[in-house]
Amino acid sequence: MSLPKAVPSKPPSDQDGQSPAAGVSLPPVEAPTGTFILQLFLIPLLIVAIVVMVWLLFSWMANMGQDNPKSLVEALARGDDSSWQRAYQLADLLRSPDPKYDALRRDSSLANQLAVMLEQDLKVPVEGDAARVRVMRRMFLCRALGSFEVTEGLPILIEAAKSQRDPVEAEVRLAAIEGITTLADRNGPESFQADPQVMQLLLAASREPDGNDPAPVTTRDGQPTTFRPQSEIRAVAAYALGVIGGEEALARLKVMLRAEAYSNARYNAATGLARHGDPACVIGLKEMLDPENERAASDENNDRDKDRKRATVLMNGIRAALVYADANPAADLTELKAALEKLASAPLTSIQTDRSRIQSSAQEALRLIEAKPTSRS
């Protein structure tokens, strides 16, 4: 039995049998007029353009002179409360890899100007409400002077690295030693090895005794830290000795590696020895590469900072292992390879920061070391 065919539906009809729409006429379609297009598109676009131009103008006015060294130095010379920001901006320009600042880094006259400013600043006691502003200004002046490719700023950096009448000035000392380190790296460490003032300063700083003064910094939640500036001075001095090198510096780093209680200083000593291919570094690098190393974050007092510090120490240990392998192609790398293998396969359950990056970096470092034709098994 066949199914009945579907009957096509028809639109309803009026009494005359025609569709209701048949007698309705629609308005003609017209092309949009120029006025309509202007109202719909161009006027809103013009408004947006005006807003953007006003924003760019205010932004330009706010940043005007920030990449002009002459304007920054003139603002620095005024010595007002915002001068520390000008010092920061100038240091940033000098540290920029942009070749257009190469001439600035070789400007002896500018280096002398900044050295005079820092010398005058150091004569003023740090006290009162302006203490923090003065400290930051001095810190960034030290960083700026350390970024030159001329050494006119070295004498005042040495002076700043020794001057401390108040605990908060330890931060200026740290910045000054960092400035000396950068200056040595830019101008060649050999001349710094032969400078008795530089070596005397750094060797003395590496023996800085721990004081009883409270730490000058606090955590983000306002709680005191276990950070002690004198310990950090030893750490920065160890880093500087590693950059400058020389027999006297490396001998001191070996002592610090065995006897230093502050982990940052000990790890910087190991890294400095690795830079010069000294096998004494291995014991320190093994500690840095240990995924269960509790001493790595012993100077931190909250979980977030402890986690960050452990991850930083592990990554620095990986880099230092590669530096050592490059600096000493004939070295026995057996112990470091074992430490890298352990780190690459460790679950790292105690670390939340960059866990996968740490493991992949350890695996890559191991691959690079094993690929060296002169490395020993």
Image: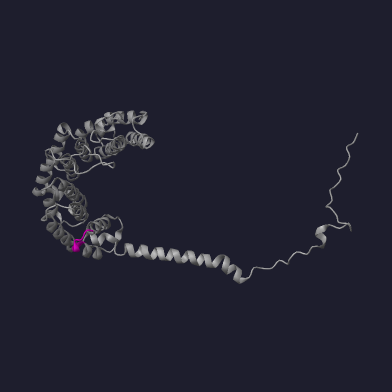
What residue is drawn where x is 86% and y is 56%?
A: 14
Q: Is 321 rendered above or below residue 60? A: above
> Can you name the residue that lies furthest to the bottom here?
34
> Can you name the residue that lies furthest to the right here?
1
**Residue 194 at least partly seen:** no
- Give residue 242's position: percent from left, percent from top: 19, 42
Picture quarter with the N terminus? top right
Q: Quadrant of residue 40?
A: bottom right
Would residue 279 be found to the left or right of residue 61 on screen? left
Q: Is 149 rendered above or below residue 291? A: below
Q: Is 227 rendered above or below residue 166? A: above
Q: Which is more toward the observer, 322 or 165?
A: 165
Picture quarter with the C terminus? top left
| Colour mapping | one colour
Would residue 222 be found to the left or right of residue 167 on screen? right
Residue range of the region highlighted in magenta in the rendering? 76-81
Q: Which is more toward the observer, 15 or 304?
A: 15
**Residue 345 at least partly seen:** yes
Q: Which is more toward the observer, 242 or 147?
A: 147
Q: Is residue 154 magenta?
A: no
Would residue 362 be found to the left or right of residue 139 on screen? right
Q: Which is more toward the observer, 11 or 271?
A: 11
- Give residue 133's position: percent from left, percent from top: 20, 54
Report the label total: 0
